[in-house]
Image (cartoon, rainbow, N blue to C red):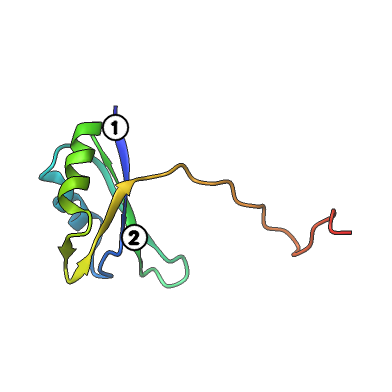
Amino acid sequence: MSCKLYVGNLSYSVDGPDLEDLFAQFGTVHSAQVILDRETGRSKGFGFVEMGTQQEAQAAIDALHDREHNGRRLTVNEARPREPRPARGRGYSRNMY
């Protein structure tokens, strides 16, 4: 079973292939994605990596969390499920009053 990891505090120069290379030394990387700003197309400084197994993911966490990469200390932990976001509307709620 694969395991998705959150990788934070990335250098803005890091891209998906760089992230994949960094994590590949710990096992199979199913996907590696750096999150980009919609308007500018620049990195937001974090991303997600999906590892092949829980053991590989834990090995990556143990080795890379709070370690320096490209001049920044990484945050690496198991990704949490995405929280539901309120729908974008007209800026008001019908139940406001």
Residue 60 falls in image quadrant: top left
Residue matched to label 1? 2
Hey, which residue is sitting farthest top in the picture?
A: 1
Element class at badge 2: strand
In screen coordinates, is 89 left or right of 60?
right
Residue located at (84% from left, 58% from top):
96
Above or below: residue 56 compared with residue 9 = above
Q: Quadrant of the C terminus?
A: bottom right
Q: Residues within 10 Å of mark 1 (few under 14, many from 20)?
A: some
Q: Are marks 2 and 1 in contact (CB under 8 Å)?
A: no
Residue matched to label 2? 46
Task: Depth check: give the residue in front, 67 or 17.
Answer: 67
User: Does residue 38 appear in this view?
Assistant: yes
Element class at badge 1: loop
Residue located at (67% from left, 52% from top):
87
Task: Depth check: give the residue in front, 4 or 67.
Answer: 67
In screen coordinates, is 84 left or right of 33?
right
Q: Position of residue 52 (x, y in %)?
A: 23, 33
